[in-house]
Structure formats: structure tokens, C-alpha cells
Amino acid sequence: MEARFVVESTLIPHTAFETATQRIKQCLGYSLKSPEPICLALVGESRTGKSRVLEETELLMPRSRTADGAVVPILRVTAPSRPTVKGVAGLLLKSLGDPKWESGTEINRTGRLEDQLRLSGTLMIMIDEFQHFFDKGTQKIFYDAADWLKTLVDQTKVTLVVSGLESCLPVLCRNEQLSGRFLAPIYMRRFNWLDAASREDFMSILEAFNESMSQNFTMPQLNSPEMAFRFWCASGGLMGHLTKLLRQAVWDACDVGRSSISLEGFEQAHKTSIWAESGVVIVDSPFARAFSFDVTQEKIAMALAVGVREVETEPDHRKRGRSKTNSVALSQVLTARGA
């Protein structure tokens, strides 16, 4: 394995990942003889690994081609912004290889899609970024597209898996017919340092990365308690941020022909891959030599602010003088403590 791609090549099937994958596989297996379509929602914050679950599940039954045409057991697409019936139907047709996916009325596209799903042997449709079916600003649900999706799975009996932020849940909760077809959601949450099982899972992930990366680089033991806490604070317990940080550290080392990654190397990778994106001003870097390993409310709140875009919903006049970190301190820390 080339050193540069060691992080991307390391698949870590942690507990939440395995649970989600197994639930989807179970639904797929039982849907073959089910009298009604089975639907499932995979929800959670950005960077918790939802898309990776869909990608790996799709690989279990890859596309193929026979003399009769393409076989697409699992059809995976990303929901468009402000979805319409024509838009979603066209997107699915395009993914199935329909050369005229942009043409036709709603009825025409729907009919062609139903035919092609049967001809392609499609058993499951996966729709990522399903929160696009709900406009948080206007609190509007795109009911036409959601109702059409319900009718499509009823007609074709395919299993439907949707994935997105928790803001997609109103689409299901406020649509009685659609919610009645869905099983209980699968939640992909960020790792919680204050929960023993979640912390152990996070450290196991670092152990797996340590095993693969140490074949190419000399570095601190990633899964030691102190290094694990550094990485949790830096990534906020988000799987996507953790892999970005590790990948950046590997790239930086490879670019200068270095076979080692020091604490300073991880600190620079952290600045490059995460700090600018989160927009949070970090005073005490998790990778600084002088970093304290005391688990404080301030450190927990800072970590839980990583990856958060919209933290406050109260009126502007009540936000003045309040920092982003302080605004999440109480609610997020209570959540981290299981309150």
C-alpha cells in the first residue's frame, strides 16, 4: 500500500458503522419476500460516517452488465437542493443510465423510471443528503417530492434508505403515510469522550489507524490515552474530521519525504484540515506540548463545537457578547454527559 493513501485505504468498521450496515443489510434481505416496501433512515451530524455506510453497503452488490442490459441492485444518489418530482425522477434515471433523463413530463419520467428499476433488477434505492427535502429557513417540506417517493416505492417494492442530518426527520414525522413505512431511524452520532463505551470505540479506531500508519511512519502511539484525548478534542469525536486530520498529516510527511510524524506534525495538520473549517478560535491546541489532559467543561464544549455550523436559534439581541464556544457549552456538555 502506498504511504500517501494509507488513511483512505484503512476501513474502520466501528460499532456504529457495523450496526448501521447490518440494519441496512437486514432490510435488504427481508425485503425480497416482504409484501410491502421496507424503508429506513440513517441520520446524524455531518462527518459521522453516514455516506461511508452507504458506499460500503453499495459495494456488497455492485453494478454489472449482462446481454440484457445493466444490472443495478442498489441505486445510490444524492438529493438535489429544493427537490421536485421531475428533478428527483431525472436524477434516478440519470444514475440508471437513461440518455434522456432530462426529458419528459412527471408522469413520463415516473413511468420510465419504474420500468427501468424493474429491468435493472433494482432492490434498493439510497438517497443521501435527505435533509434537502426540508427547508429549515422556511420550515417547508417538499411534500410533492416526498409523496412521489412514497408512491414510487409502493409501486416498485424497492427498499428505500435515506440518509441525512437530523433536520430531515420532519419530512418523515409530518407525513403520516411516509412515516408509516419507515422503521426506527439509525443514529450515527459523534464519539462521546465522557461515555466509556464510546471512548473505547474511539480508541479502537485510533488503534487500527496506528497499526496501518506505523508500517510507513514513526510516530506517537495514536491510541494511548493521552494521544486519544488530543485527537478527540481536535476532531470533536467526528469520524470524518479524524480521518481528514490523519490524512493531512500523512500528506505533509510524504511531501517532504519524511518517514516520521511528530506531535508538531499533527498540530500543523490540525490547523490545515480542521481549524479553518470550524471557524473556532483555538487558544489551547490539543497537540501543543503543554496541553493539559484534564477533562474540563471548557475542553468538552470546545470539542463539541467542532463541525457545528448553526448553534444558536435565539434572537440576535440575546446573542451579543457571547462566543460560539460558550453558546454550546451547557446544552452540548449535557448531551455529552448523557443528560
Image: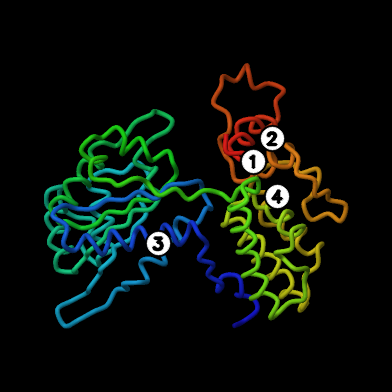
Residue nearest the observer in this picture, 233 or 322? 233
- Which circle marks residue 325 in the picture? 2
Q: Is residue 141 above or below residue 100?
A: above
Q: Secondary structure at mark 3?
A: helix
Q: Nearer the viewer, mark 1 or mark 3?
A: 3
Q: Nearer the viewer, mark 3 or mark 4?
A: 3
- Which circle marks residue 233 in the picture? 4
Outermost residue on the right side: it is 290
Amino acid type assigned to the residue bearing label 3 in the image: Thr
Q: Secondary structure at mark 4?
A: helix
Q: Earlier in the sequence, mark 3 or mark 2?
A: 3
Amino acid type assigned to the residue bearing label 1 in the image: Ala
Q: Is residue 95 above or below residue 60?
A: above
Q: Earlier in the sequence, mark 3 or mark 4?
A: 3
Residue nearest the observer in this picture, 312 or 169? 169
Amino acid type assigned to the residue bearing label 4 in the image: Cys
Residue 171 x %, y %: 32, 37
Q: Earlier in the sequence, mark 1 or mark 3?
A: 3
Label 4 – label 2 distance at C-alpha? 13 Å
- Which circle marks residue 21 in the picture? 3
Q: Quadrant of residue 75?
A: bottom left
Q: Is residue 269 above or below residue 180?
A: below
- Which circle marks residue 305 in the picture? 1
